[in-house]
Amino acid sequence: MSQSTLADFMKEYKQKIEQKLRFYISSLDSPPVLKEAMDYSLQAGGKRIRPVLLFAAINSFGKDPERGMDAAAALEMIHTYSLIHDDLPSMDDDDLRRGKPTNHKVYGEANAILAGDALLTYAFQIIAQSPDLYEKEKVAIIEQLAKAAGPEGMVAGQVADMEGEKKALTLEELEAVHRNKTGRLIAFSVRAGALIGGATEAELAVFERYAYHIGIAFQIQDDILDIVGSEEKLGKRVGSDIANHKNTYPALLTVSGAREKLKEHVHQAIEELNRLNVETALLKDIALMIATRDS
């Protein structure tokens, strides 16, 4: 599948997920400032990689990707809540996110925290109320999303990342941090899409291994861009990892070594997809795009 086809797919489903997110926020019976703060970060931009992965996984089985719209909306809400909280002064203390002032800079710390809390809890309500998912699918998706985002997943990774600032991590320890902090939501994206598409248990295991490799690749490229990237394209400060004494792949391996490790993970991700008898061209193109993105 050509890059132009991937670009068309991403453009189409990026627009659809953003329309769905606007609908969900506008339908809330909540204080205006809370709705504004939630919507502000949800609509701040980004490629919507996680929802696109979910849609692409469904598409690989020849099913309608829009059956996963509510799961994708919930996923993006949880991802956005994590960014709002990561940017807080008590965490990474960032002033910019995707080229705009961070949520707490616009709405204050209290409202930013509450906006994140609201997005996290609303996500599970959306899945539970989805008219497009079967009851069995809802239960499985809620369980997997909670595990991916919670104390055994993303939150655990964030804690380990902060604790890691106090010491030098090995490559294995660093991968363990990011397997949780970044990789678990990416893995959920792929697994949920495959589940909705009708994957067998054996196929789900292959999709999960693919997701593991692209999750690590995504974080390696993030670390590289923090050194060599453009602040204008990234929409946030560059060099913040060094300033915050964070453990990164370039710090451990050099920029050149990190790029080699990135290629290895992308290659392994594509090799996993070659084991499947479904249409995986979109997912392969996404793996390649993750390795070459500049924002």
Image (spheres, rainbow, N blue to C red):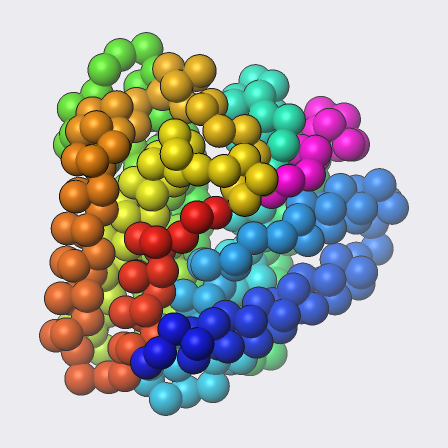
Counting from the top left corner in percent of width and height, residue 290 is at 35, 55
Of residues 64 and 229, the one drawn nearer to the viewer in this rendering: 229
| Extreme residue in the top direction | 166
| Extreme residue in the right direction | 32
Q: Residue at x 48, y 29 (%)?
A: 238
Q: Residue at x 21, y 21 (%)?
A: 169
Question: Where on the picture, by quarter, is residue 126?
Answer: bottom right
Q: Residue at x 28, y 69 (%)?
A: 284
Question: Where on the picture, by quarter, is residue 15?
Answer: bottom right
Rendered position, 136 above or below 257:
below
Rendered position, 34 above or below 249:
below
Question: Where on the picture, by quarter, is residue 222?
Answer: top left
Rendered position, 254 above or below 221:
above
Counting from the top left corner in percent of width and height, residue 147 is at 38, 48
Of residues 255 and 241, the one drawn nearer to the viewer in this rendering: 255
Q: Residue at x 62, y 52 (%)?
A: 45
Q: Main secondary structure of the magenta part?
A: helix
In which quadrant will I find the N terminus? Answer: bottom left
| Extreme residue in the bottom direction | 62
In reply to whether residue 17 is colored magenta, the answer given is: no
Counting from the top left corner in percent of width and height, residue 143 is at 41, 56
Counting from the top left corner in percent of width and height, residue 269 is at 20, 60
Judge whether residue 232 can be spotted in this image. Answer: yes
Left-right relation of 17 to 153 = right
In reply to whether residue 104 is colored magenta, the answer given is: yes
Of residues 229 and 68, the one drawn nearer to the viewer in this rendering: 229
Q: Which residues are magenta?
A: 98-113
